Image: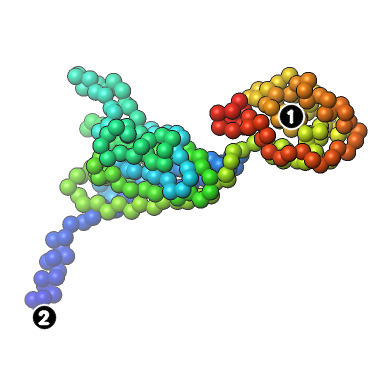
Amino acid sequence: MKKLICALVVLAMASPVWADVNITASVVVDTCEPNKATVTVTFDASGEMNNVRAYAVDITLEGDAAITDVTCADNGYYVYPGSIAISSSGEVDDWGSCLCDSSYAGTQPGLDSNGVTVEMGSLYEDGQPAPADVNTMVVLDIVGCGDVNVVLALNAIRGGVVMENPDEPVTVNLTGDSCTLECGWWYPECWDDPQQCHGDADGDGDVDTVDWPDFRDGFGKACPDAGYRPCADFDRDGDIDTVDWPQFRDWFGKFPPADCTPGDINEVYKPGGPCAP
């Protein structure tokens, strides 16, 4: 019995100490445009003496959504081993992007799809600061409809996670996130008011002097002009002009019928439209 206990102790002492790295996605839905959201991916190796030297991670969306933009974190990490360009003298000509080119083997399709591969690595000389042990990896903009899950996975072909000591085994804990995006696209809330198209800019059911300033100050302006007042755009075509005037004039001092078609009837806020953010 004593020999067995001794053997177990020896095995325990001989086993390698694994590094522990947490990579986490968090999603925040845009309050102004609830069909859009921001995904922030961070890593945390704060419990380790041996920091993350490089990583390659696949970020994919489950559901009806696409990744429209990627912002690389500027934290002393730079592209590795993707698009960085180094001259023959050893100088960096182009730091490149953390977004891995979809033409590389084993990578996700890229922007305007449901998946991207991001990879970054630290490049520094002796005496310069080492990589931080907690940092933002990348920030993504997404657009979609309905329930969306953000899924993280190591990209082993591109290298996965590499520690400062590459011989140290590492356990990577990946945590995704989810959100619900509104379908369609954002447009001014007042365009759902049933009397807005008849000159009721403030949505109180009548057309009076309170509605006048929006029309007066917005007249002659079109989105995305700063002075454009969408609630006074009674025909909802993205500008306030003489075509909008008759509705205000004819219904002034009256209670117009509640028969306006709700929404962005001319699709000027639709992605690609003249009013799209």
Which part of the image, by quadrant, shows the N terminus?
Answer: bottom left
Is residue 87 in view?
A: yes
Q: Amino acid at mark 2?
A: Met
Q: Position of residue 167 (x, y in %)?
A: 17, 47
- Considering every residue shown, the one lying at the far bottom of the view is 1
Q: The residue under label 1 is which amino acid type?
A: Asp
Point 30% across, 41% down: residue: 56
Q: Is residue 277 visible?
A: no
Dot 2: few (<14), some (14–19), or many (≥20) neighbours within 10 Å? Answer: few
Tell me the number on the disc at residue 151. Answer: none
> Marks 2/1: CA distance?
89 Å
Taking depth in this image into account, of 32 and 269 the one nearest to the observer is 269
Q: Which residue has dot 2 on it?
A: 1
Q: What is the number of the mark on residue 235?
A: 1
Q: x and y percent of residue 74 in the render?
A: 38, 33
Compared with 197, 40 (above or below) is below
Using the image as rendered, state which of residue 55 and residue 12 is in the foreground: 55
- At x 25% / y 37%, what residue is drawn? 105
Give the crowd class for mark 1: few <14, some 14-19, many >=20 residues within 10 Å: many
